[in-house]
Amino acid sequence: MRIFASFLLLLVGFSFSAKAEVTMWTDPDFGVVIAYPDGWTKQVNKHDGERLFIVAPAAQDMAQCKMDIEKDERFEIYPKKYLKDIVSRELNDSFWRQYFVNYDDVKIGYFAEGGGLGSGYATYVDFAYKASFNGQARQMRGVAYA
């Protein structure tokens, strides 16, 4: 028993704390808080609705994250008990097809209703599209919530 306790003490003595370096970002207008790896770089937003655009350090794989926020007050007149049904009806497959109109060769692989985003209901899609990087077309994947 004494050998086991000494071995355990030795393991505890040599354990190192994890040093996860993250950047915390808060949107000043909507209060959305996002944590992302410290090595990712913030880019210039391309339009007013784009609140955050970050890219991974290894730019050759084009890993990136974009967050667009748009104030939508259409559903505020309804009681909260109807929001799940309203979101399912309004943020459906047709909504996503219109949302991706500026993407090339979009294929929606998975669509889910009844998800959550913060304190509200949301729909979710897993999608693939083509993008150009350094003049070469590349197949990309993404996930999106609304």
Image (cartoon, grey):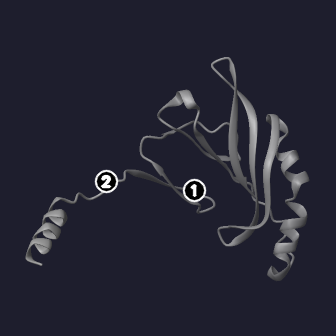
Front one among 28 and 37: 37
Of pointers 2 and 1, the one earlier in the residue sequence: 2
SS label for mark 2: loop
Which quarter of the rendered picture does the N terminus lie within? bottom left
Q: Are marks 2 and 1 in contact (CB under 8 Å)?
A: no
SS label for mark 1: loop
Check the image and report above or below for 75 versus 79: above
Mark 2 highlights which residue?
19
Q: Residue at x 57, y 56 (%)?
A: 27
3 relative to 40 in the view: left or right: left
Q: Residue 31: horizontal and vertical position, in percent?
A: 59, 63
Q: Residue at x 82, y 46 (%)?
A: 99
User: Crowdedness of circle 1 by 10 Å Cα count: few (<14), some, many (20+)?
Assistant: few
Q: Residue at x 47, y 41 (%)?
A: 40
Residue 10 picture quarter: bottom left
Mark 1 highlights which residue?
27
98 relative to 44 in the view: left or right: right
Q: Residue 52: horizontal and vertical position, in percent?
A: 60, 46
Q: Residue 5: horizontal and vertical position, in percent?
A: 13, 74
